[in-house]
Amino acid sequence: MNSHPNDPLHGYSLETIVTRLAEDYGWDGLSDRIRIRYFATDPSIKSTLTFLRKTPWARKKVEILFIETLEKQQRG
């Protein structure tokens, strides 16, 4: 039985989420979509993970964008 049937993020690590979003949109695209200044100032996967782990509101915005992106891809 699936213990997380309503969690669309189940099975995705934060690193996977950030990597896929960076590949799909690029850092400039992430900065435009999420409006976090951090993405516009020399970001990297490692530093972004550190920032998001310390900043719950920013992490939530990234997770929401990832879920929306997954839903768009599933719809085709």
Image: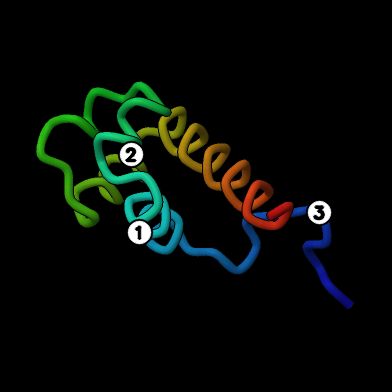
Residue at the disc numbered 1: 19
The relative height of residue 23 versus residue 29 in the rendered view (above or below) is below
Q: CA distance from mark 2 to mark 1?
A: 18 Å
| Front residue of this view, candidates 64 and 75 | 75
Mark number, residue 47: none
Of the residues shown, which amino acid type is indicated by label 2? Lys
Left or right of 46, for residue 41: left
Instruction: Please tell me which residue is depicted at 73% across the width and 52% down the height of the picture.
Output: 75
For the residue marked with disc 3, what is the amino acid?
Asn
Residue under label 3, please give it. Answer: 6
Does label 2 or label 1 sit earlier along the sequence?
1
> Where residue 76 appears, x then y in whole percent?
68, 55
Q: Percent x, y for residue 57?
A: 46, 28
- Please state which of residues 67 and 49 is positioned toward the viewer in this rendering: 67
Q: Dot 2 corresponds to which residue?
A: 54
Q: Residues within 10 Å of mark 3 (few under 14, many from 20)?
A: few
